[in-house]
Amino acid sequence: MAAFCRGRHRLKSISGLQTSIRQLSGKFDYDVVVIGGGSGGLAFSKEAAQLGKKVAVLDYVEPSAKGTKWGLGGTCVNVGCIPKKLMHQAALLGTAIKDAQKYGWTIPSPVSHDWATMAAAVQGHVKSLNWGHRVQLQDKKVKYLNMKGSLVDEHTVKGVTARGKEMTVTTRNIVIATGGRPKHPTHVIGAVEHGITSDDIFWLKESPGKTLVVGASYVGLECAGFLTGIGLDTTIMVRSIALRGFDQQMSGMVTDYMEAYGTKFAWKCSPTKVERLPSGSLQVTWVNNSTKQEGRDTFDSVLWAVGRAPEAKQLNLEKVGVRLDEETGKIVVGPDEVTSVPSIYSIGDISQGRPELTPTAIQAGRLLARRLATDSKELMNYDNVATAVFTPLEYACVGLSEEDAEKKHGKDSIEVLHAFYKPLEFTVAERDASQCYIKAVCLRGGDQRILGLHFTGPSAGEVIQGFALGLQCGATYTHLLNTVGIHPTCAEELTKLNVTKRSGLDATVTGC
Ligand code: FAD
Ligand code: NDP
């Protein structure tokens, strides 16, 4: 293959000659080449370039099975956090319209929601973020290559454009930040042909209509929540439990609220077949895992939210010696994000054992850039990372669940303080607050260090974010009680927790 040039880049053949020239001269095209321009890859690239490194980032979006594609920025910006939170906001506004009438607003009825208007506005915002990332890369002198990357050797990356043009670049270090993509349940007949995933839902031009959401973790519950909230007939199919890995009492609060809010739940059911009927509707057949009885219903859309698979298969990792976890297929990394090949690092969702969250990918990327570009030794602290589930009743937490605290410290060594509270805004609106609940899981002895905080209610993420700082600082139950609340807020209820679960006393907050 002939060598050719474009801009400042040497586009080369993948030949041993190039490798040996590089080895003789000891020079690389770049200090770091990043594969994947999502949360982690972009944060790394910008930080490393700012610290004086010569950086290139390859980002390439393989269209979804339905053909959906998007721009620079990765999952969070295009098909994750951002469009999800905006559609969640659309749903919350629907509830606010109902409340508003109790607060004196006259709302002409019937109130209706238009998917196309919401989707166009959300997609417009996402496109502005795509553009913003491109501009930032340019400003910081990071070379952006819209190419699919893979490894040639431990210092060489191959890029391929959508039109099939190839190039290779040499680099001192490589950072892999390719994230993951939604899975389809391949054992379900018709799953790929007739189903969509979170890679498609935010880019639909028309309403998905009556929707079956399969899977009951973050993605499934959040999507079902906003679909219900904008008035669509929505069912979640749960094969086992909801929000696996989260505190299960809190998970129950979230799903109980959703049921009351109008989301239907098909508990302990697994789909077996999806067929397109002549009418255009999708007929879904499922089996109840307990009774073994078959069920059937028709939907306009089926959304698979059955987990995500790492984007590692096409990177040529094993050939270069980068070790993958046998079970998950993710890249095995050390605490400094290094892979089994010393010049290659991996950050974000693609790395084994890391939380699949944007802020952890960003922070890990920035810290890695500082370690590679300066004499920094600071490692990413993955402990006590706070998170929120943006369901109709939001849930946020930091630290251990009650179950995990019991497992780690023993049931007798922990004290759980809890409260059922009523957000002030629910009172005039006459909204049911049965699932607005708070608990602090603390050590029982010594200084009663807080192990976990859990909150369901309005703006849960905003509430828990600040308290997460407390956990990083080793906050105790006494610190919590010595914190004076801001009145009248929901967050202040955390500072007033005084009923232990052990006491069996009524934990309902009364009075002001
Ligand atoms: P990604 O952001 O996935 O970026 C990887 C990039 O690499 C992509 O652009 C991909 O196209 C590209 N790529 C892959 N292979 C190649 C290749 N061979 N060559 C070149 N480019 C390649 N997290 C939160 O913290 N809060 C939330 O509210 C939240 N909501 C979410 C909602 C949904 C529906 C989903 C699916 C996820 C959500 N997440 C949320 C998780 C969050 O989006 C991810 O944890 C985060 O995006 C991971 O960042 P990353 O850099 O590891 O990978
Ligand atoms: P998860 O892997 O967390 O959950 C997958 C869900 O699908 C589980 O409920 C699982 O059930 C179910 N499932 C798996 N296979 C099948 C099947 N064949 N049939 C029926 N159900 C099935 O994946 P998600 O996609 O929800 O989330 C991925 C990650 O993305 C999360 O871990 C999170 O870190 C991140 N994220 C963060 C968000 C936030 O911060 N708010 C929002 C969305 C995603 P079972 O429990 O039985 O295995």
Image: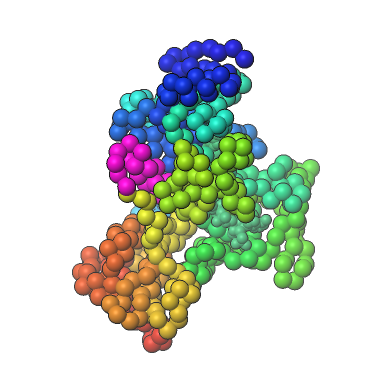
Q: Of 297 and 506, which appears nearest the observer?
A: 506
Percent position (x, y) of residue 2? 59, 12
Return the residue nearer the eye: 48 or 105: 48
Q: How is the image coloured?
A: rainbow
Q: Which residue extends farthest front? A: 24
**Of the pair 63 and 373, the residue shown nearer to us:** 373
Examine the rendering and report whether any part of residue 427 can be seen: no
From the top left corner, tell me how far across and down residue 74 is, in percent.
48, 38
Identify the magenta region: 358-377
Residue at image location 48% in from the left, 68% down from the top: 247
The correct choice, above or below, for 82 with respect to 220 in the image is above
Q: Residue at x 22, y 65 (%)?
A: 486
Q: Does residue 496 lie above or below 172 as drawn?
A: below
* Quadrant location, the N terminus: top right
Does residue 464 show up magenta in the picture?
A: no
Q: Looking at the picture, how far across and down is residue 352, in whole percent? A: 52, 51
- Check the image and report above or below for 63 versus 6: below
Position of residue 306 relative to residue 202, above or below, is below
Viewed as shown, does residue 275 lie left or right of 503? right
The main secondary structure of the magenta stretch is: helix
Give the total number of marks visible in the rendering: 0
One can see residue 309 in this view: yes
Residue drawn 53% across and 20% down? 18
State the image quarter where residue 397 is shown: bottom left
Q: Residue at 47% of width from left, 53% of height from top?
A: 354
Location of the C terminus (image quadrant):
bottom left
Q: Is residue 154 left or right of residue 327?
A: left
Residue 362: say if magenta.
yes
Residue 95 drawn at (x, y percent):
44, 56
